[in-house]
Image (spheres, grey):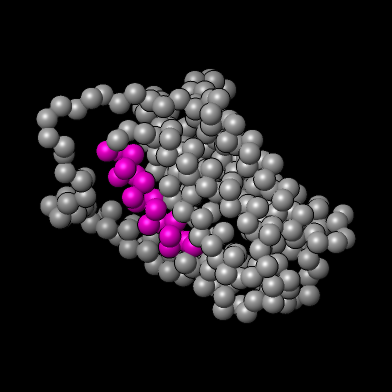
């Protein structure tokens, strides 16, 4: 992307991009080692790892739907964004003090609810503040910074595992609070809450209707089906972490597997500005 469009991307989009980066650093520091912590420290069965991961992602998706409806109804985008990130940040110390799988479940539950709550209103803010011709670039920038945080976080976790000798997992969980707290400060200081015009008269019905679904094009339906099939086939990264451990890879090296995966994703995500489309 040329320098000129980069300079034209609104400040709020840049702030939200760095908010995403910091939050992903915080979250991925934990996620890169959480399966190891559950199995090696809490002596959890792999079944519970899968159950917690699956339930957490389901909750995140459900929360994303409802947060989008609430944000559209009341226009409190910044409040919902802050609440979602705050819930994620507040879950971090719960991982650090967890001594049972149940505690980890509730921490993961809160973390994923926070992710679901913040996603739709954050994207709505980006859409509101970005010129139409820069929508793809704006979303691509945020996604690219988000993905960058997703490989910086595991890299930090790996570095800490190489240097720490006692209670390394819990120390990593506590340190993950630092980038999380910084992202909350960025939201308060740098994110605008776009003004939405007042709408007089009766409220409009929810945008998803049976008639609207019938008007979806065959091409869109095909993409939707493919997305569902790929989602069904996708398994949690937690199992990749545990498989690496089963293969005999030392704990300190395992987060670097996630670094490689996220590095590839980050390198490809910013290409969205070329086609002005949003990928998630």
- Answer with left or right where residue 204 lies relative to residue 258: left
Left or right of 279? Residue 29 is: right
Residue 63 in magenta stretch: yes
In the image, what residue occupies the spot 78% across and 75% down?
248
Where is residue 160 drawn, in percent x and y? 81, 53
Q: Is residue 270 left or right of residue 167?
A: left
Residue at (39% x, 60% y) in the render = 227
Residue 93, how many percent across, how many down?
65, 52
Magenta span main SS: helix
The residue lying at 69 percent from left, 48 percent from top is 176
Q: Is residue 184 above or below residue 40?
A: above
Q: Nearer the viewer, residue 104 or 128?
A: 104
Magenta segment boundaries in residue numbering? 56-73
Residue 77 in the image: state x and y as whole percent.
39, 35
Residue 141 in sight from this viewpoint? no
Q: Is residue 125 visible?
A: yes
Q: How many marks?
A: 0
Image x and y of residue 263, in percent: 65, 50
Quadrant (top left/top right/bottom left/bottom right) for the N terminus:
top right
Q: Residue at x 64, y 35 (%)?
A: 182
* Residue 213 higher or lower than 124, as above or below: below
Q: Nearer the viewer, residue 79 or 229?
A: 79
Q: Quadrant of residue 158?
A: bottom right
Magenta span includes 277: no
């Amino acid at each position: 992307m040329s320098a000129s469009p980069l300079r034209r991307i609104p400040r709020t989009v840049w702030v939200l991009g760095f908010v995403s980066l910091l939050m992903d650093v915080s979250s991925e520091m934990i996620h890169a080692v959480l399966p190891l912590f559950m199995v090696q420290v809490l002596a959890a069965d792999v079944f519970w790892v899968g159950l917690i991961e699956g339930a957490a992602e389901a909750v995140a998706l459900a929360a994303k739907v409802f947060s989008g409806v609430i944000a559209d109804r009341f226009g409190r985008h910044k409040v919902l964004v802050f609440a979602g990130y705050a819930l994620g940040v507040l879950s971090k110390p719960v991982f650090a003090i967890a001594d049972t799988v149940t505690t980890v479940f509730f921490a993961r539950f809160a973390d994923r609810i926070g992710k679901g709550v913040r996603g739709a209103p954050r994207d709505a803010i980006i859409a509101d503040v970005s010129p139409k011709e820069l929508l793809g670039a704006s979303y691509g920038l945020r996604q690219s910074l988000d993905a960058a945080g997703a490989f910086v976080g595991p890299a930090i976790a790996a570095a800490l595992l190489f240097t720490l000798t006692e209670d390394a997992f819990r120390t990593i969980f506590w340190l993950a609070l630092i980038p999380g707290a910084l992202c909350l400060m960025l939201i308060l200081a740098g994110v605008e809450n776009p003004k939405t015009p007042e709408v007089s008269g009766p409220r409009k019905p929810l945008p998803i209707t049976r008639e609207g679904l019938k008007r979806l094009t065959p091409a869109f339906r095909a993409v939707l089906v493919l997305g569902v099939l790929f989602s069904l086939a996708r398994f949690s990264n937690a199992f990749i972490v545990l498989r690496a451990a089963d293969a005999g890879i030392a704990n300190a090296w395992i987060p670097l597997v996630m670094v490689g995966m996220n590095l590839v994703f980050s390198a490809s995500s910013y290409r969205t500005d070329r086609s002005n489309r949003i990928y998630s």
